[in-house]
Image (spheres, rainbow, N blue to C red):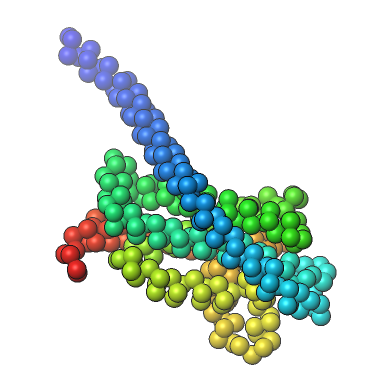
């Protein structure tokens, strides 16, 4: 009789136990997210030179480079603008993208460093899915990128470059900024899988950062490239994910339809992050790197 009573009680208790385990698992996952994000924020707060270097580069472009081309678009109205604009206003979204791009690549350097020092090996032993741990790293990278981009926008405003950020369209621009930061951070995460040593970082970045930035609409619109006869540059810029990140931010700022750019950014985010998770499989990427022989 007692056995039958216990059998009748088990089905009622098992869902409650599973629900409790799910809540504990969710709480544990959120604690891991908080810990990883706070670690990155505290590390960034101690590296004051990192913020300065992140702002100096785009501000030099804004204050010096844009000065010589200030009225370059005085002969035509460029989408998504409804009137003539100075050059510094046009390149401002591209310079915001530059901040996101360089910080995303900087995060890949941090990942390689953490892996070389054994910190990633320790992190991957946590009783959480590998993809969730990498997603936490990605969220921390994107948060730092967005904060640096907002700091740049504030300084640019002080220098006289007015962007319509305090409007209803500004909320869409913030969404575009966050998604672009996630996409470029996922690209850095993916690259960190294939950069085996810190010494290889600079060479790899030269083949990623500069082509992505200069073969995009960060500095000039697509129609200018096509008009100048640089067809191969025009085609590369069309299919460059960074172009679509910049265009989404640019069009969102002025409340215009960004076309397919959001889908390209989100699709590249999913592909880059999926490849990064696949690369950190114990049988590939991280596991293979941990097993390589010294000097190999």
Tell me: residue 7, above or below residue 186.
Answer: above
130 and 155: which one is in front?
Answer: 155
Residue farthest along the top direction in this orientation: 1
The C terminus - image quarter: bottom left
Residue 85 occupies quadrant: bottom right
Q: Position of residue 119 (x, y in %)?
A: 30, 49
From what the image shows, is residue 38 above or below residue 55?
Answer: above
Which residue is rendered at x = 18% and y = 60% of the image?
291
Q: Position of residue 202 (x, y in %)?
A: 40, 71
**Camera-side residue of 12 and 229:** 229
Looking at this view, is 284 or 34 the one in front? 34
Q: Is residue 79 left or right of residue 122?
A: right
Residue 33 can be seen, yes or no: no
Q: Residue furthest front?
A: 49
- Image coordinates for residue 154, horizontal then vertical, percent: 68, 53
Residue at left offset 30%, top offset 66%? 197
Q: Quadrant of the N terminus?
A: top left
Q: Is 261 positioned to the left or the right of 24 in the image?
A: right
Q: Vertical placement of 166 versus 99: above or below?
A: above
**Tag count:** 0
Residue 296 seen in this snapshot: yes
Q: Position of residue 18 (x, y in %)?
A: 33, 29
Which residue sits at x=44%, y=47%? 43
| Front residue (pair 230, 89) | 89
């Amino acid at each position: 009789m007692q056995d039958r009573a216990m059998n009748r009680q088990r089905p009622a208790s098992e869902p409650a136990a599973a629900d409790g385990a799910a809540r504990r698992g969710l709480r544990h996952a959120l604690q891991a997210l908080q810990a990883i994000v706070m670690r990155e924020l505290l590390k960034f707060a101690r590296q004051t030179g990192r913020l300065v270097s992140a702002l100096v580069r785009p501000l030099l472009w804004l204050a010096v480079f844009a000065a010589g081309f200030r009225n370059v678009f005085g002969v035509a109205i460029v989408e998504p603008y409804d009137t003539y604009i100075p050059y510094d206003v046009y390149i401002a979204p591209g310079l915001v993208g530059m901040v996101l791009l360089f910080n995303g690549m900087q995060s890949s350097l941090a990942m390689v460093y953490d892996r070389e020092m054994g910190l990633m090996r320790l992190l991957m032993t946590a009783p959480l899915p590998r993809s969730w741990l990498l997603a936490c790293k990605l969220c921390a990278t994107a948060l730092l990128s967005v904060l640096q981009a907002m700091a740049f926008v504030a300084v640019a405003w002080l220098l006289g470059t007015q962007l319509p950020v305090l409007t209803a369209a500004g909320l869409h621009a913030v969404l575009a900024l966050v998604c672009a930061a996630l996409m470029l951070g996922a690209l850095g995460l993916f690259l960190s899988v294939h950069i085996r040593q810190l010494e290889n970082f600079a060479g790899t970045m030269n083949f990623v950062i500069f082509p992505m930035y200069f073969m995009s609409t960060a500095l000039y619109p697509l129609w200018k490239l096509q008009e100048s006869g640089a067809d191969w540059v025009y085609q590369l810029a069309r299919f460059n994910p960074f172009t679509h990140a910049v265009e989404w931010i640019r069009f969102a700022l002025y409340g215009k339809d960004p076309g397919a750019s959001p889908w390209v950014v989100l699709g590249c985010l999913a592909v880059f992050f999926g490849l990064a998770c696949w690369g950190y499989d114990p049988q590939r990427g991280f596991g293979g790197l941990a097993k390589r022989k010294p000097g190999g």
